[in-house]
């Protein structure tokens, strides 16, 4: 009964998994869809895998990806793991209407990013805060808390909120990375530059995990499975939560 595909009828006709890991099990269902990366926002020189949750840049330049669900209100959380290092990795949020596949995620008036190699916050092709947080590299997990109620943005590295940030501080915005525009839909996303390493990022929106979760944390509604605790009042980006808070 511990195997994936447990027979809930009580008859014990369980499937034995073959070439499946715990990360292959998904809580995504027809009645509750979780965000994935947007397969319509891609070109041939980068790829999506693992149920459109793993982003590989095999081009010679900058490439961007973003979630296929966006929100204009509510509070949302996701995690991104750097599987393969790239100096120019930037993770953050972007207005899907401003998406450009061949540039940085922040290279528009509606994109905000936390940069891997110097810990800065970038906006509109410039530096918004040059001393925001720590650098991050292979194996690190970046949490993003997007507060579209108070229009604030927060980043965590391996569970520690950068700049002494407090995603639960509301309108005060303690340690916020940026003030987001109002009346705008935002999606989660990232961009990388291939410098001969074919950098890989793994995204966790709560439904399926491409990287191993050692602890397991859901949101207050019981949705999602994250490595680190979801801040109080924040939710996994899925259709049931959107119906309630989005």
Image: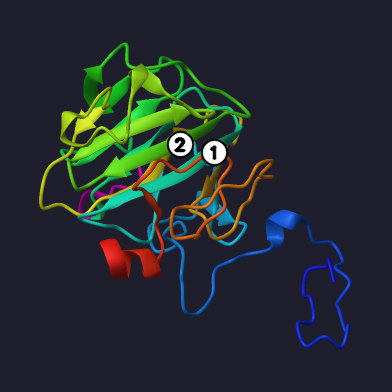
The image quadrant that residue 163 belongs to is top left
Q: Quadrant of the N terminus?
A: bottom right
Circles 1 and 2 in contact, beta carbons < 8 Å: yes
Q: Nearer the viewer, residue 225 or 119?
A: 225
Q: Is residue 229 left or right of residue 243?
A: right
The residue that label 1 is drawn on is 228
The residue that label 2 is drawn on is 143
Q: Nearer the viewer, residue 80 or 162?
A: 162
Q: Please tell me the numbered disc located at residue 113.
A: none
Residue 175 coordinates in the image, percent (x, y): 28, 22
Magenta segment boundaries in residue numbering: 97-102
Q: Earlier in the sequence, mark 1 or mark 2?
A: 2
The image quadrant that residue 94 belongs to is top left
Task: Tell whether position 99 is magenta.
Answer: yes
Q: Nearer the viewer, residue 97 or 240?
A: 240
Secondary structure beneath dot 2 equals: strand
- Rendered residue at 45%/36% (across/down): 143
Residue 184 coordinates in the image, percent (x, y): 15, 52
Q: Quadrant of the C terminus?
A: bottom left
Residue 235 coordinates in the image, percent (x, y): 39, 53
Secondary structure beneath dot 1 equals: loop
Q: CA distance from mark 1 to mark 2?
A: 8 Å
Q: Nearer the viewer, residue 201 or 132?
A: 132
Image: 219 above or below 242: above
Residue 37 coordinates in the image, percent (x, y): 45, 56
- Rendered residue at 88%/84% (across/down): 13
């Amino acid at each position: 009964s511990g195997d994936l595909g447990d027979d809930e009828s009580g008859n014990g006709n369980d499937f034995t998994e073959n070439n499946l890991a715990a990360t292959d099990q998904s809580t995504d269902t027809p009645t509750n869809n979780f965000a994935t990366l947007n397969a319509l926002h891609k070109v041939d020189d980068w790829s999506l895998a693992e149920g459109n949750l793993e982003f590989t840049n095999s081009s010679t330049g900058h490439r961007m990806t973003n979630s296929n669900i966006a929100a204009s209100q509510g509070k949302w959380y996701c995690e991104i793991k750097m599987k393969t290092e790239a100096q120019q990795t930037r993770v953050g949020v972007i207005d899907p209407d401003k998406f450009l596949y061949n540039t940085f995620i922040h290279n528009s008036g509606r994109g905000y990013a936390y940069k891997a190699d110097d810990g800065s916050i970038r906006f509109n092709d410039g530096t918004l805060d040059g001393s925001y947080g720590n650098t991050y590299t292979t194996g690190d997990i970046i949490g993003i808390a997007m507060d579209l109620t108070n229009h604030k943005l927060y980043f965590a590295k391996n569970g520690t909120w950068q700049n002494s940030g407090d995603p639960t501080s509301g309108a005060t915005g303690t340690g916020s990375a940026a003030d987001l525009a109002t009346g705008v839909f935002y999606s989660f996303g990232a961009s990388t530059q291939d410098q001969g390493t074919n950098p890989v990022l793994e995204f966790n929106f709560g439904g399926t995990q491409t990287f191993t979760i050692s602890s397991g944390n859901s949101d207050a509604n019981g949705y999602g499975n994250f490595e680190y605790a979801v801040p109080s009042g924040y939710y996994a980006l899925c259709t049931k939560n959107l119906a309630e808070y989005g």
